Each structure stands twice: as structure tokens, then as C-alpha cells.
């Protein structure tokens, strides 16, 4: 067959000029793989510095929507004996720490009772006096007994006992919901040729810690019907045995230790009070969900009351910016936003002149977080800029937790105008949206090559196989997807990418056989 070169115009009929490029809008974005946030709880603590003996509690009102309060409540420790030698000194019992959670109702006024510690026996010259019971708390501790006039073997005769610690509590009116018992006071020592050692106080506990004897009769566990700890009796007549320790306060107060029965006996230590939790109000929660850590042991004795709760209202603030086709900042007023999430008020808002709109987030009772969907009102030709970092399918918004750390919040794209974020209870989320006036443009250049990639110019020999190569560039300011040629002649070009970010390029190639054309 005779081969003839084709005219340049014939080749041009197969060239770039006939390639019509089409591009679809960018596909919906995928989930932004950033760290999500945990629910934030609020906390409040009260100690004895915030109350007094006239009003020994602080009133706290349960906020709207809150139905659970986590707590750590501790009783005060008992007082020790005066520090006269190793054998003659003992510490009071530790106050109990109670931790858990209570069912509450919005508007209830809870009384938070911190607890004071029992006083230790006082040393003043050669004279010592018994320690008083903790006087501030839900229930007072009992006082110790005994007075040391000194003058016998170095002034250790009749060493007095310490006072019991007060009980801490959470109460509704006068009805206790949680009581953390105080510890018992230490019993006083004496001397009978060998040391009659001082006895440590009983710790507060579920049933009240038992006081000790040496050899005086032991104080009884939780024996008192009253919540106050029992006051220790003084030694009878001129007998100067060791003084008894006061009982710790509690749901039931601990009994006091008995004083020494004769000149040579040590006094008994006070028993700790007993704990209490209202079973109808008790509920199971994980304390760390509320930012609390349970005490390492059951007894800490600092008398503090701490509560924590998840607030029921959060906020989502939308801030927006718009850029026209030239890249210059444009007005942001009038852009509308709404949410399909229930318990939102208001349900729709428009950006103000500063580019902000704020939604309040309502929660079902007890919820620790809520998923909120924000929809931007469609505005033809002004898409949300959701391309960055070399990817087209980015999130529609950049959201952060409104705290000092500006922690990123996961954003899930629902469709081209809607995204979702999780709002922790009580948290403030700020989401930033960037809109751009779309100016889509594509440019293409091309050439003919032989199968080895050598340029052929504008002519080729009929019957030979050649390649038609196009370089397609997105010269607009919005991404394009589903790039394809409208030229229906087979074969269709194969492109390296079907989606292009602004200023990105791809190469499209197809092979053709040159057909003979009459001159």
C-alpha cells in the first residue's frame, strides 16, 4: 500500500483542538482523622476554710439537665496524744473517704459539709489538756479527756486523749445522702514502771472503726445512736490514769475510749464513726469520666468535699470567611446556617457582620456529649473550600475545642453543605468555614508522539501507530473531579488522575492508527 504523509490540517483534526474537557464537582469529603475530645466535667470543692460553726455547709444548686453528681467526701481525722516520747504518743484515727455518684434532680439544693479534724492533746510546760472534738461538719467529733499536771517521772502521768474528727457529708436539707465518718481520738498513756503505751484512735469506716484498749475497755464500734462522737469521761476522783479519746462523728458516732481505771492505766482510744450512702440515690459511674480519681485508700482524713458533674448546655460557634474569584476578601454577612439536631435553640442563624453565628446545644438529661449537624444554606457558585494539604476530600470545617489548648475536634462531612461534630457537655466548639466564589477553568496542551515518546510534529505516515498526549491543568480556583474527554472517538484517553486541585496537572494519553487521507 502506498504511504503518503498527511497534511498538517488532517493531523490537526485529531489533535488537541477537538478535545473537550469535562469536570464534575468535587466528591463529598471523608472523615477528618483528627483526635476527638472527651467530655469535660465541672468540679467544685469545699473545705473548712469556706464554712464556719454557725453555718457548717455550702449550698449548691443542681444545674438544669444534670441528673448525676460524682463525689469524694472525707471525714476529719482524730486528734493524737501530746508528743511526749515514743511510748506516750499515738495518732488519732483517719477519717474515711467516700467516693461514688448520686442521682440528683435539677434545682435540688444540696448541702456540702466539709469536716474539721479532732484536736490533739495540748502540751504546755508540764501541763497537758485533752484535745477537743472536730466542731465543724455534718456531725461533730467527741472530745478527749484528762489533764496532765506533770511532776511524775518526767511529766507523763495522766497523758490526756485526743478529740474525735467530725464527719463530712452531702445532704438534702437535713437528710444525709452521703456521710464520711471521722476518726476516733487517740487514748492517753501512763507509766507503771514500764510504759503504758498510748493507743491510736479507731478509723472511720462502714461500721465505725473500733477503739483500742491498753488495758482499759475498748470503745465500741458505732455504738452511739447520735451522729456525734461520744465525749470521753474524765478519770474519777484523784486517779490520774490516761485520758480516753473522743469518738469520731458519723452517720452513727463512735463511742469514746474509757479513761484509765487507776493511776497506772492508759486510756482507751475513741472509735471511729460509721459511713452512710442513701441506697435510693446511689448510682454506678466511672469517676474518671468526671475527672475524679478515687483515693488510693479508704482513709484520707482531710475533710474536703468535692463534687463533679457534666453541664447540660454547650455551644457551637461558626466563623466564616469568603473570597471572591480574584482572591480578595468578600463580605460574609447573610450566609445562613441551620441544624437538624433536636434540642437546639435557635435552629437557624445567619452570619453577622463579623462572620459569626452561635448555636446553643441542649442535652437529654445525663448525656455527656451530643452529635450536632450544621448545614450551610446553599449559595450558587460559592462552594465551601474543603481542599487543603494536597487532598480534595477534606472536612467542610475546621473545629476546635474552645479551651486554652485549642484541641482539634473530629469533623464528619455529611454532604456538600453539611458536617457533624461531637460537642461534649458544657464545652464550647468553634468551627471555621471558608467559602470561595468558584471560577473553574481547565487548560490543555498536547502533541503527537511515536510509541517511543519521540515528538512527531504535525504529520505522520499513514498506517503507523502514534500516541496523542495531553497535559491538562486546573487553572481555576476550585477542584475538579471526574475529568474526562467529551470526544467520543475510540479509544478514549486514559488520564493519570481524574481529580485535580487548583494549579495541579495530569497527563492523558491515547493511541491512534493514522488513516490515509487523499490530498
Image (cartoon, helix red, strand yellow):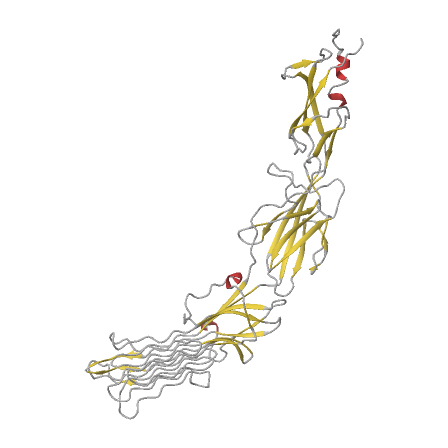
Q: Residue furthest top?
A: 2
Q: Position of residue 196 (x, y in %)?
A: 25, 81
User: Does residue 427 lie above or below 58 as drawn?
Assistant: above
Based on the displayed image, in which of its 4 quarters is residue 462 positioned? top right
Which residue is more in the foreground, 280 or 429?
280
Q: Position of residue 82 (x, y in %)?
A: 29, 77
Q: Residue furthest front?
A: 1
Q: Residue at x 74, y 19 (%)?
A: 15
Which residue is more in the foreground, 13 or 475?
13
Residue 224 can be seen, yes or no: yes
Based on the displayed image, in which of its 4 quarters is residue 283 positioned? bottom right
Q: Residue furthest right?
A: 518
The quarter of the picture where the C terminus appears is top right
Q: Position of residue 56 (x, y in %)?
A: 49, 77
Residue 351 can be seen, yes or no: no
Q: Position of residue 477 (x, y in %)?
A: 68, 34
The quarter of the picture where the N terminus appears is top right
User: Does residue 427 lie above or below 185 as drawn?
Assistant: above
| Relative to 13, 52 lies left or right | left
| Relative to 242, 194 lies left or right | left
Which residue is more in the foreground, 298 or 41?
298
Which residue is more in the foreground, 58 or 238?
238
Q: How many marks?
A: 0
Amino acid at each position: 500500500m502506498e504511504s503518503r504523509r498527511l497534511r498538517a490540517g488532517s493531523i490537526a483534526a485529531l489533535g488537541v483542538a477537538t478535545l473537550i474537557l469535562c469536570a464534575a464537582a468535587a466528591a463529598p469529603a471523608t472523615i477528618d482523622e483528627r483526635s476527638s475530645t472527651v467530655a469535660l466535667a465541672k468540679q467544685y470543692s469545699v473545705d473548712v476554710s469556706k464554712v464556719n460553726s454557725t453555718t457548717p455547709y455550702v449550698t449548691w444548686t443542681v444545674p438544669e439537665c444534670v441528673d448525676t453528681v460524682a463525689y469524694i467526701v472525707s471525714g476529719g481525722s482524730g486528734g493524737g496524744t501530746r508528743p511526749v516520747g515514743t511510748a506516750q504518743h499515738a495518732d488519732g484515727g483517719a477519717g474515711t473517704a467516700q467516693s461514688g455518684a448520686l442521682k440528683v434532680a435539677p434545682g435540688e439544693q444540696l448541702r456540702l459539709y466539709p469536716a474539721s479534724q479532732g484536736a490533739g492533746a495540748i502540751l504546755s510546760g508540764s501541763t497537758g489538756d485533752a484535745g477537743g472534738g472536730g466542731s465543724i461538719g455534718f456531725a461533730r467529733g467527741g472530745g478527749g479527756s484528762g489533764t496532765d499536771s506533770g511532776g511524775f517521772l518526767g511529766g507523763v502521768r495522766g497523758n490526756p486523749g485526743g478529740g474525735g474528727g467530725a464527719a463530712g457529708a452531702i445532704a438534702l436539707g437535713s437528710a444525709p445522702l452521703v456521710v464520711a465518718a471521722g476518726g476516733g481520738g487517740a487514748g492517753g498513756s501512763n507509766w507503771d514502771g514500764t510504759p503504758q503505751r498510748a493507743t491510736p484512735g479507731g478509723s472511720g469506716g462502714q461500721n465505725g472503726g473500733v477503739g483500742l484498749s491498753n488495758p482499759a475497755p475498748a470503745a465500741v464500734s458505732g455504738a452511739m445512736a447520735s451522729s456525734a462522737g461520744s465525749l470521753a469521761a474524765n478519770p474519777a476522783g484523784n486517779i490520774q490514769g490516761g485520758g480516753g479519746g473522743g469518738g469520731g462523728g458519723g452517720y452513727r458516732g463512735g463511742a469514746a475510749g474509757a479513761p484509765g481505771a487507776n493511776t497506772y492505766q492508759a486510756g482507751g482510744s475513741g472509735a471511729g464513726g460509721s459511713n452512710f450512702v442513701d441506697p435510693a440515690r446511689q448510682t454506678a459511674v466511672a469517676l474518671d469520666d468526671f475527672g475524679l480519681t478515687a483515693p488510693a485508700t479508704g482513709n484520707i482524713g482531710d475533710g474536703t468535699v468535692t463534687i463533679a458533674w457534666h453541664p447540660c448546655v454547650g455551644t457551637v460557634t461558626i466563623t466564616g470567611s469568603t473570597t471572591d474569584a480574584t482572591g480578595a476578601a468578600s463580605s460574609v454577612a447573610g450566609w445562613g446556617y441551620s441544624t437538624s439536631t433536636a434540642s437546639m435553640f435557635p435552629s437557624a442563624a445567619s452570619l453577622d457582620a463579623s462572620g459569626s453565628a452561635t448555636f446553643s446545644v441542649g442535652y437529654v438529661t445525663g448525656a455527656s456529649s451530643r452529635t450536632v449537624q450544621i448545614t450551610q444554606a446553599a449559595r450558587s457558585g460559592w462552594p465551601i473550600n474543603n481542599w487543603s494539604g494536597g487532598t480534595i476530600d477534606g472536612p467542610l470545617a475546621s473545629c476546635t475545642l474552645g479551651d486554652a489548648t485549642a484541641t482539634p475536634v473530629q469533623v464528619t462531612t455529611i454532604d456538600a453543605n453539611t458536617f457533624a461534630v461531637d460537642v461534649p457537655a458544657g464545652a464550647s466548639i468553634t468551627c471555621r468555614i471558608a467559602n470561595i466564589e468558584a471560577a473553574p477553568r481547565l487548560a490543555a496542551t498536547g502533541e503527537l508522539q511515536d510509541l517511543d515518546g519521540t515528538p512527531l510534529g504535525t504529520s505522520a505516515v499513514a498506517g503507523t501507530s502514534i500516541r496523542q498526549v495531553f497535559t491538562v491543568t486546573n487553572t481555576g480556583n476550585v477542584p475538579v473531579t471526574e475529568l474526562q474527554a467529551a470526544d467520543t472517538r475510540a479509544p478514549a484517553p486514559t488520564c493519570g488522575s481524574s481529580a485535580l486541585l487548583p494549579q495541579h496537572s495530569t497527563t492523558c494519553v491515547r493511541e491512534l492508527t493514522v488513516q490515509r487521507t487523499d490530498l
